[in-house]
Image: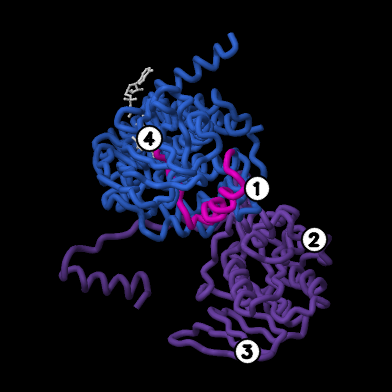
Chain colours: A blue, B purple
Amino acid sequence: MTHATEEQQQVRELAREFAERELRPHVERWDREWALDASVLPALAELGFFGMLAPEEYGGMGFDLPTYVGALEELAWGEPTVALTLSIHSAFAVSLLLRHGSVEQQQRWLGPLARGEVLGCLALSEPGAGSDAAAVQTLARREGPGWVMSGTKKWVTNGRIAGLAVVLARTDEPPGSRGAKGIGAFLVPTESVGYDVGEREHTMGLRPAEVVTVQLRDVRLGPEALLGDASAGFVYAMQGLDVGRLGIAAQAVGIAQAALEHAVAYAGEREQFGQKLRTFEGMQFKLADMAARVDAARALVAWAAATPSTRASSAAKLFASETAMWVTTQAVQVFGGYGYMRDYPVEKLMRDAKATEIYEGTNEIQRVIIARELYRGA
Amino acid sequence: MKIVTCIKRVPDTEARLKIAAGRDIDAAGLKFIISPYDEFAVEAALQLREAKGGGEVIVVSVGEAAAAEQLRAALALGADRAVLLEAPPTLDGLVTARALAAELKDANADLYLFGMKAADDDQQQVGPMVAELLGLPCVTVVAELELGDGKILCHREVEGGIEVVEAPLPAVVTITKGKYEPRYPSLKGIMAAKKKPLEEKEAAAGPSRVRLLDLSHPPERPPGKVVGQGADAVPELLRLLREEAKAL
Ligand SMILES: Cc1cc2nc3c(=O)[nH]c(=O)nc-3n(C[C@H](O)[C@H](O)[C@H](O)COP(=O)(O)OP(=O)(O)OC[C@H]3O[C@@H](n4cnc5c(N)ncnc54)[C@H](O)[C@@H]3O)c2cc1C
């Protein structure tokens, strides 16, 4: 089950090589400049990474989830922002369209998404709707055959550069009356009049990612904007999150692996008391624990990808993100004072890791979900 | 346009090699790659095919069964089909060249490309030997190729200049680092490679007449020496460079 096929291995190797040559050399500068070089996403598109979950008939790769998470892990090892962007694009735009899009919607969007000509983003969170995602207040009012959308979406990663936003909005009347069953998912072209990008957040980590507020000011949409059933958007969002959390888990493993490698290298070179750090047993135990946890997280993610379920995705996201946070914190410790300084790579990884414990459902929410699944049907 | 490119499976040039029992490198846990000069040759073949707007690129390797991995990698880069000629490793370049020539004598290709040398054994023999066995013209150490009408123009970087050499097709050319920076395989290429033909057969390889006797790491380099500081140190540095290092 977790034994990689030759194809998975080759895909991983390509992602690792790309990460090593095209991402790694620049991460420090991108972190400072709050942006990736403009050439990075087009290069990934050219190689096919935007189409990993899209079917071959639309120019995608039709990868299974184990192949997909392997690629994301390696890209995250290079620059976690890149994996985040591809994960959101794949889980919420590509896979939801595949699952619930009409033939017309698939024909319009899947090709451009798979080729990376259009980037997908998710606009779910709102000032008052975070963990309680069903509390969204953005409205989609019926008008003639179409819709008029208004509201404020917070923390939309890539909300400015994306071409397609998957937006969750209330469709029930009166608004809120049907709770989680009164929400629709909409395919909103970001060029729509009234889709206005506001403030960019100053994030702790993942700084090359642009996280923005999006104002929806009476955005007029045709009937073709509605994905599937107007009252099932919340269910779709949860299905998207099942795939999304695998991507975040893979991202976390990549971050942890990078931190582990930096720590191992540093402990092999730095000397104190006339000895390499690696010769101290206290250091060896720390490195061994880091390595074992990374191995365990990777195996859990591979298992969750091979036998997908809500519980498996939540467990993978929970465990991998906590592993990333713990391992990056230890890596900073291994570097000592240097670890705290911007000149060394590990404090950035620690800042990046923190986000994986928060987005796509905080880890408290993952625990709520796992516990709920334990009692499902009881 | 039909181009044959011959490639060799070699240990990753960035790997730290260990020697097993004084005779061979320890392959355990070692990563293998397409020899880098051969990879330039594959890239050259792909670019020529693209410039022509069509044609066939065939990759051929003499080696152990595991070399199929490198042939698949070349297919993922864009080669059309592959042939593996199975044979035990040899240091006798003529054995490899004969195995290739036996396979290629009826290939009717326009161009036969090789890396200028294999990154492991560094002998620079096989390309020219195949040319000799096939009775074809051979241009070595070529940085850039241009197709003419029934001929090939080869840019060679020679000491202090660039030489442009012409040869009629079919011809054998060995490639060095120059224009042909290898591309990444695309994900599509990796998927497509699985479905492309890879023929495996016994190589027509005779016995090796060259034999490896011993393999060892070079002696540790003596540590560097600080001669002094500033302009005062220059005369002593010159003396040492002249008398000890014999570099001047
Ligand atoms: C870098 C970044 C990028 C993001 N990108 C996107 C994006 O692209 N699209 C998008 O829609 N959103 C995005 N988000 C938003 C993210 O999904 C939310 O921040 C997250 O769901 C948490 O919501 P909140 O911030 O409102 O926290 P809150 O829900 O207010 O939670 C605050 C704290 O209370 C805890 N808590 C809440 N409920 C419970 C409970 N029932 N039991 C126990 N503890 C609880 C939480 O775990 C947390 O510790 C992004 C966030 C970040 C940081």
Q: How many marks?
A: 4
- Along the horizontal axis of the image, is A222 left or right of A274? right
Q: Which residue is mark 4?
A: A139
Ligand 1, by image quadrant, is top left
Q: Are marks 1 and 4 on the same chain?
A: yes
**How far apart, in angstroms, are the residues tagged by discs 1 and 2?**
19 Å
Tell which of B228 and A325 is nearer to you.
A325
**Can you see residue B20?**
no
x, y percentage for residue B87? 78, 60
If you read the primary sequence from the N terminus, does the residue marked by circle 1 or circle 4 appear first? 1
Label placed on residue B148: 3
Q: Earlier in the sequence, mark 3 or mark 2?
A: 3
Q: Is residue A114 magenta?
A: yes
- Name the mark nearer the viewer: 3 or 2: 3
Q: Amino acid at mark 2?
A: Glu
Q: Label 2: which residue? A: B199
